[in-house]
Image (cartoon, coloured by chain):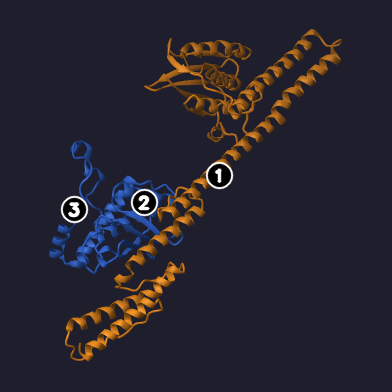
Chain colours: A blue, B orange
Amino acid sequence: MGQTYNFAWDQLGDIEEGRPNLGNRTSVAVYRLMQYTMRAVLEAEYGDARTRELLVMAGRLAGSEFCKNVLDVSLPLNKFIAQLHKALIDLEVGVMRVEKSDPENLDFVVTVSEDLDCSGLPLKGVTVCDYDEGFIEGIFSVYTGQSFDVKEVDCWTTGERTCRFTIKKKAS
Amino acid sequence: MTENEREIVRRITDVLEKMASGRKPSRIEYTETDAPDDSTLMELEAKVVELNNLYAESYRFILDLARGKLNGDPPPHNNFVTPFKQLQSELRHLTWQIEQIAAGDLDQMVYFSGDFSRAINQMIDDLREREELRQQLADSNHAKDKLFSIIAHDLRNPFNAIVGFSEMMVQMVNMASPADLKQFAEMIHTSAKQTYNLLLNLLEWSRVQTGRIDVKPMEGDLALLIRTNVNISSITAEPKQIQIYYDGGDSYPVTTDAAIFNTILRNLISNAIKYTPERGEIRISVDTNNRFYYISVHDTGMGMSEEDVQKLFRLDVIHTTNGTNQEKGTGLGLILCKEFVTMLGGDIYVESEKGKGSTFTFSIPK
């Protein structure tokens, strides 16, 4: 994470004060409208590969800020994962489950069902959760202080019913 | 129906019968029949062959899954296997959860098939309950060890002094001067008083341990309670010429158990007297917010290191330091204070600096 971005958590604003009646929630369709229109514009401007890279970078920034501002990084790994699981459910992002964890080698496989980004999308034959890849990478990087490769290997848009991510520590 | 069409129907029937038989399926190659009259029939055959091949490719994966092998790789681009991949994912996560439970993480909650989840979650609840019981047993063992230690050392020593000095008095009654006899009597008195105080604490502590103390809050005046304790304790402080001051206000309405409050304050003042040198001073103050009173007992005594502070209030650590006049202590008084403060719904804190004194502050709800 060598790059510095002009982002700070307080840019999210005081939602309680700003939306006293409408509150802190919006619909999934609205979130996807923003995500996929932005994606479409980026693809048109920069092509598919660069768009994916940009989405991963944005997700990584979001994941690392989310980890720093929302999660307790002092917890041991299992408690940290339980905390992350609960946070993602509480925020209605998705249901994260661990399929495999190798804490010694920092090698994990997790699935996310009912994913905010993709569950219910039409089949495309390719994965679309690039932003999620970066998000997970950002969280694990902040928590462990190591760099990770996160790859989505299954997605709703490839015909699966849950998204599956492999998370591996980058070889130093 | 033409001969070609009959041949196609025969092949379709053959494939479907094999699939329905439950035998291990094998891939088949689709062979296009020449000049069929019904192209829909050809299309149907192609679909049936595709279905057979998807099933054949999935078979090993599904069989492995059924045998509990959860790490098999599903065939790529095969939608037939999608629900089984979902099952594989659930089973992998379940395996991971069971591993965590086995490693002692009893915060796991399993959501997988109603009856199964209920049974596992019930088991986790039972394990958690047993772990709590085990912890209670360990605490009880620490309490027992502490009790034995007190009886073995702290209760025996003052009795040794009483027995020793009284024996000397008996032997020397005709030879000793009145001043010597007075000194012996004072030593016996000091030891007896020390033993009596210790017994009082032991008795109260044993009542706490066996749950025989009920908190009976009543309306009263905190300032009055403190002033009464200050007056009583001043007599004990007199031999060391220690002054005890109450710096608080005239009246603080409170609803608390006065007897328990008195035991807490009596112990803290007694401790302060013990560790304050002659002609020192002890100050008692009261702070307040919306919900609590904070009562502080500040002394100008020996103080403690950070390491010693960490050992206070703990049953599993036997930590005592003699007073400025070599008064003996057991640490039991502070443990009792902690238990009693908790019973009243408050908390207790210590600030101390070696050589400068200590401040014990406890809170009680208003």
Do marks 2 and 1 share a chain?
A: no
Q: Position of residue A13 (x, y in %)?
A: 21, 41
Residue at position x 28%, y 56% from top? A115
Q: Amino acid at mark 1?
A: Arg
The alpha-carbon separation of the residues under discs 2 and 1 comes to 26 Å
Q: Position of residue A74 (x, y in %)?
A: 41, 47
Quadrant of the rendering where the C terminus of chain A is positioned: bottom left
Q: Amino acid at mark 3?
A: Ala
Which sits earlier in the primary sequence, circle 2 or circle 3? Answer: 3
> Is the residue marked by circle 3 packed among few (<14), some (14-19), or many (20+) residues within 10 Å?
few
Label 2 marks which chain's residue? A
Q: Position of residue B251 (x, y in %)?
A: 43, 11
Residue at position x 48%, y 10% from top? B224
Q: Nearer the viewer, residue A87 or A1?
A: A87
Name above or below for residue B115 compared with residue B242.
below
Q: Quadrant of residue B58?
A: bottom left
Label 1 marks which chain's residue? B
Check if mark 2's residue and mark 3's residue have beta carbons within 8 Å: no
Q: Amino acid at mark 2?
A: His
- The residue where tag 1 is placed is B130
The local secondary structure at tag 2 comes to helix
Report the residue that reaches farthest toward the front.
Answer: B1
- The residue where tag 2 is placed is A85
The alpha-carbon separation of the residues under discs 2 and 3 comes to 23 Å
The alpha-carbon separation of the residues under discs 3 and 1 comes to 47 Å
> What numbered label is drawn on residue A29?
3
